[in-house]
C-alpha cells in the first residue's frame, strides 16, 4: 500500500507560507501606504486592526491557522483520491475491469 502525503508537512508548509505572506504584506503596506492592502486583512482576519503589536500577532496566528485549515481538508481528500487512483491502476494492470 502506498503512503499518502504527510498532514504535518503540508500543515506546517501551508501555515508558514501564509504567515510569511502576511508579514510581507504588512511590510509592503508600511513601505507603500498609497498601495496598502490592509483593508483585505480587516475582512479576512477576525479581530485584526491596523496596526498594533497585538493585532499583528493575532493576524500572524490567524494566518498560520488558515494554513492548517487548508491542510486538514486538502490532505485527506488528496490521500483518498490518490488511494483510489492507485487501486484502479493496480486492478487495470491485472486485467480486471
Image (cartoon, rainbow, N blue to C red):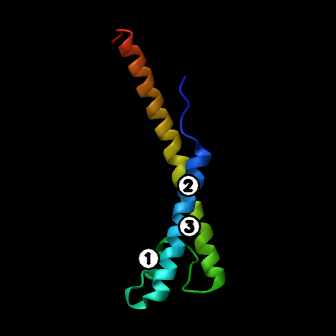
Q: Residue at x 44, y 25 (%)?
A: 86
In the displayed structure, 71 sits above or below 20; it is: above
Residue 48: image x %, image y %?
56, 78
Query: Helix, strand or loop at disc 3?
Result: helix
Q: How many numbered marks are there?
A: 3
Q: Quadrant of the C terminus?
A: top left
First reached walking from the N terminus: tag 1 or tag 3:
3
| Tag of residue 13 | 2
Query: Helix, strand or loop at disc 2?
Result: helix
Q: Quadrant of residue 89?
A: top left
Dot 2, how many residues are within 10 Å of its Cα: few (below 14), some (14-19), or many (20+)? some
Q: Quadrant of residue 35?
A: bottom left
Discs 1, 3 touching: Cβ within 8 Å: no
* Residue sticking out furthest to the bottom: 34
Q: How far apart are marks 1 and 2 (CA)?
A: 23 Å
- For marks 1 and 3, give the one nearer the viewer: 3
| Residue labelled with disc 3 | 19
Q: Residue at x 54, y 34 (%)?
A: 4
In the displayed structure, 87 sits above or below 57; it is: above
| Residue labelled with disc 1 | 40
Q: How far apart are marks 3 and 2 (CA)?
A: 10 Å
Q: Residue at x 37, y 13 (%)?
A: 93
Camera-side residue of 19 and 63: 19
Discs 3, 2 touching: Cβ within 8 Å: no
In the displayed structure, 26 sits above or below 85; it is: below
First reached walking from the N terminus: tag 1 or tag 2:
2
Amino acid at each position: 500500500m502506498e503512503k499518502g502525503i504527510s498532514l504535518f508537512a503540508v500543515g506546517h508548509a501551508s501555515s508558514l507560507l501564509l504567515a510569511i505572506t502576511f508579514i510581507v504584506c504588512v511590510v509592503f503596506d508600511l513601505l507603500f501606504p498609497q498601495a496598502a492592502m490592509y483593508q483585505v486583512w480587516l475582512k479576512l482576519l477576525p479581530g485584526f486592526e491596523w496596526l498594533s503589536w497585538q493585532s499583528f500577532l493575532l493576524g500572524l496566528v490567524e494566518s498560520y491557522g488558515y494554513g492548517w485549515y487548508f491542510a486538514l481538508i486538502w490532505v485527506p481528500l488528496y490521500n483518498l483520491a490518490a488511494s483510489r487512483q492507485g487501486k484502479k491502476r493496480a486492478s487495470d494492470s491485472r486485467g480486471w475491469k
